[in-house]
Amino acid sequence: MKFLKKLTLPLLAFAMALFVSGLLVAFSDSKVLALKSSPLSMLAKAFSTAGSAYWALFRGSIFDSQLTDAGLLHGFYPLSETLVAASPLILTGLSVALAFKAGLFNIGAQGQFIAGAIGASYVGFHFEMPIIIHAIAAIAAAMVCAGLYGGFVGFLKARTGAHEVIVTIMLNYVAGYFLLWLLSTSAFLRPGRQDPLAPEVHTSARLPHLFGSELRANLGFIVALLGAGAVWWLLNRSTWGFKFRAVGANASASRTAGISVGRSTTTVMFIAGALAGLGGAVQILGSEPAMTAGVGGSFGFDAITVALLGRGTPIGTVFAALLFGALRAGGLTMQASTDTPLDLVLVIQALVVLFIAAPALIKAIFRLKSVEAGQAVASKGWNG
Amino acid sequence: MTIQEVRTLSAPERRRRRGIITMGGLGLFGLIVFAILPKQGQPVTYSFVLGNEWVLLKEWILNSKSGSLAFSLISLAAVAVAALQFKARKTIRLASGIFGASFLMSFLSWAAAGKFIPFTGLLQGALLLSVPLIFGAMAGVLSERSGVINIAIEGQLLAGAFASGVLASLFHNNWIGLAFAPVAGALISLLLAIFAIKYGIDQVVLGFVLNVLVIGLTNFLYKKLLIPYQSTWNSAIAFTPIEIPFLSKIPVLGPIFFSQSIIVYLMYVVVAVIHIALFKSKWGLRTRAVGEHPTAAESVGIDVNKIRFKNVIIAGAVAGLGGAFFTLGAVGSFSKEMTAGKGFIALAALIFGRWSPLGAVAAALIFGFADNLQGLLTITGTPIPSEFMLMAPYIATIIAVSGFVGKVRAPAADGVAYKRGGGSH
């Protein structure tokens, strides 16, 4: 029962977000707007337009009966796509969530993700190694690259007081351009090609598929879940985690109590960076073996919404990433089959987080007496 | 200076001391890399004439190696002067300015060896690139000085750009578009104000989500309406520049400041009004009081949340107006995510400028200049790969933030929701 009560708010928020976005879909459609003269049929058309968009969203993210000709398992191909999309989101989301707990706002998951992707890609295609060891080496390289990239931010903050929000925003741009340059150098160009596309990583470094070669879901999802477990352990069961949370709750008090705030900041940002970098490795080794200039996508941006929706906890982040992964996978189907732009997904994401962040609003709309709200993520502002 | 002496310095003094050390390091770097390392000099041409202003000096040709040497020596001399003034406990602002200008000239003379630099055009472009940053940073000042963190600048700019482009196109009238840009920005701010002030939601979280919402909405409508029905929805034409008589004829300064579109002139007014009002008016005093110590402000009868609400809405309107620059001030029509992260750069300028209007303007101008310089050098070609040139403004910001600014102090109550009687501290 307690679990159900905890789910009330997120479910209502999701329903509200779908409702509002549905209005947007319906009343920006020219066929709906053409029926202005008869309100009733306009309403019916609006309903069916939004309905078919959402139906496509479901078919693209969970189960599609049209695909079952090749076996029942294949009908779950969309679900597998959801897992593929969710895996890097879980890890980048954890990166942001961990930093939040330590009182830091890591906008830099994008740059750290790219740093990780570069590390994993280079080790993956440049070296020849036995299976398993190769994957582990690539993942380690990704985590170190990205960890240093993130740790640098913490180091700068600890030494000079430079605010992490500014530095991470700037480093995102730097990483993007660095990747662009790297892809034009001979080390990262495919032999005989001039376009910005790195060689594919060797199969020995790839993460194996979980449900046969037909479905793209791979070990990366398990890696992401292990990452969530590790962050949970770090935050709740380790001395370092205690220090992180203490600094996040009150830096001055922690300093008085003898915790080195600077070292905590640097360490948190290193680990956060490594997590985002692991996300980059999962993307490269799991589903996108040839790195392009667009490898970062909008992972860093989405990571923040994921962490916010997950209220900064590891388990919440996993569920939030699954939801966003489903929206992302389904959004592609929706765009292809119903002429509804993929960007609707961004609107849904923003509305979900907005409604979840405002339990008072949901309570007022649904006239609920009590809703389990839990502790929302709180940033430290600028002076934190 | 011994460690004991350093410890007794106040925070601004320590910041100044670190600034001098950073300048010294940069100056030496410039001397070695720009002036000593290059094997031979080539002529660099600076041209100063852009339009039909009065001609004072048409162009100036100098040798890259000796030019770099001269300018880096001037910059090092400026560092020495700054150090002496610091010892004498005097302001080092002028010396720092001279350092910055001569260091840049030394870099330019090196990077443009054998090339042509349209000097006036470089500065004019820099101002244009700073316009949205300045509007955005002013929105930040208005909101954050009253105690509400405004991460939603990006969304406010984008909403303003969208509304102005679409409405100017629908009504075939740029003035209607320009009038609705602040309205759109204010609507985003209304959401920020309601959720942050009424419901007390974390402001950083909220601002970020509003950005995602505006990006999603404008992208959606762009694909659904603006692309398929472009002639109706997205065919606005930019304002033409207005030349101010006499002033626009001044050499160098004229084309930069007085031959611009109406939105740039509005920007001068906005900056001046905000600067004066914030420090000289009753509204400004109340705003700052509410941002620093809301409990004290309320104890003398100020309605904290009312002032914050008002300021956040005005902030959105200012940013929305800045958004119109992307469409009506530059290219006319709207394109997807055309603000391209400028709202976040504006946020950086706000922090870099330490929440003061003029400081934020200076930071925005520096960023605009770096951005435009990068564009120019990428076209003319330099010894550096173009991707590194593209990175330069961002790296420069990191150096500036960690080397000169250091730890910043925001308004004390910035980001803290206020409950009447409950107090926030």
Image (cartoon, coloured by chain):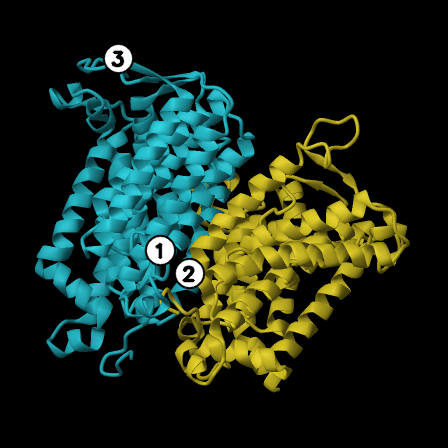
Q: Amino acid at mark 2?
A: Thr
| Dot 1 and dot 2 residues touching (CB under 8 Å) | yes
- Quadrant holding the N terminus of chain B: bottom left
Residue at image x 19%, y 55%? B88
Identify the amino acid type marked 3.
Answer: Lys
Label 3 belongs to which residue?
A: B58
Residue B176 as seen in the image, left or right of residue A80 = left
Q: Residues within 10 Å of mark 2 (few under 14, many from 20)?
A: some
| Mark 2 lies on residue | A160
Chain to which the residue tagged by mark 1 belongs: B
**Residue under circle 1?**
B18
Q: Where residue B163 sits: x, y (%)? A: 35, 40
Kindly state the secondary structure of the residue where label 1 is placed: helix
**Residue type highlighted by circle 1:** Arg
Cα gap from disc 1 to disc 3, whole angstroms: 39 Å
Chain appearing in cyan on the rendered image: B
In the rendered image of this protein, which colour is used for chain A? yellow
Tell me the CA gap for discs 3 and 2. Answer: 44 Å
Mark 2 lies on a secondary structure that is helix
Which of pointers 1 and 3 indicates the residue nearer the eye?
1
